[in-house]
Amino acid sequence: MSNLELEQLREKVDAVNLQILSLINERASVIQDIGKLKEKQGVDRYDPLRERHMLNLLKDNNDGPLEQKTVDHIFKEIFKSALNMQEEDTRKALLV
Amino acid sequence: MSNLELEQLREKVDAVNLQILSLINERASVIQDIGKLKEKQGVDRYDPLRERHMLNLLKDNNDGPLEQKTVDHIFKEIFKSALNMQEEDTRKALLV
């Protein structure tokens, strides 16, 4: 009985993982669009004020159980990955 | 006009961020339930085979634009945060 329960909880985690995957890819796609727009405008992609705004918004909406420092840490990794992706795109474009 | 476009894209990112926040908390909550169940069963919380299974499932479902190594990296941070949260809970329980 307990193993069935464990199996069900794991299936739930798998489903949530796939939803998170879809959202981080959707986010990355919007960040690509923002990058292109900023490139046209000739402004720097990295914007520490904007990052602070996003972290504050997350803090105001975090009902747990994850602690804020953990949420901050995960999102900083997500922010970083989006910037890295853009740098990689630029590098590839320069090589063409 | 361009700034309006930037503002709209940023609002989209903010909305996606909040959805991700909600899902990583939902995930953490299920992981807490799994932890309690495993505690009752007396089995170890950390399960490398289960982690491999989750990463494989993500790989099979990753349509980009994020590269797989980036997805792996973000999820390993998410996995780690769930384990840390449980260890912290256990530590607090031991102190009571």
Image: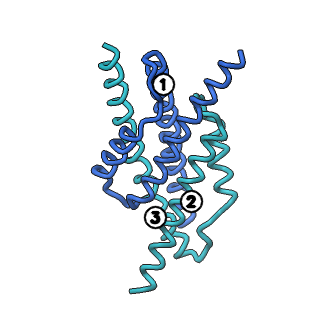
Chain colours: A blue, B cyan
Say which quadrant the C terminus of chain A sits in: top right
Percent across and percent down for residue A93 are 65, 18
| Location of residue A80 with respect to A91 vertically, above or below | below
Per the model, the C-alpha gap separating discs 2 and 1 is 30 Å
Q: Nearer the viewer, mark 2 or mark 1?
A: 1
Percent across and percent down for residue B70 are 62, 40
Residue pointed to by mark 1: A35
> CB of mark 1 within 8 Å of CB of mark 3?
no
Farthest left residue in view: A60
Q: Secondary structure at mark 2?
A: helix
Which of the two discs, 3 and 2, labels the residue nearer the N terminus? Answer: 3
Q: Residues within 10 Å of mark 2 (few under 14, many from 20)?
A: some
Q: Nearer the viewer, mark 3 or mark 2?
A: 2
Callout 1, which amino acid?
Answer: Gly
Q: Residue at x 48, y 47 (%)?
A: A76
Q: Residues within 10 Å of mark 3 (few under 14, many from 20)?
A: some
Callout 3, which amino acid?
Answer: Asp
Percent across and percent down for residue A59 are 32, 52
> CB of mark 3 within 8 Å of CB of mark 2?
no
Percent across and percent down for residue A41 are 42, 17
Per the model, the C-alpha gap separating discs 3 and 2 is 16 Å
Q: Nearer the viewer, mark 1 or mark 3?
A: 1
Residue pointed to by mark 3: B33
Residue pointed to by mark 2: B80
| Location of residue B76 with respect to B8 vertically, above or below | below
Q: Nearer the viewer, residue B13 or A34?
A: A34
Q: Are marks 2 and 1 on the same chain?
A: no
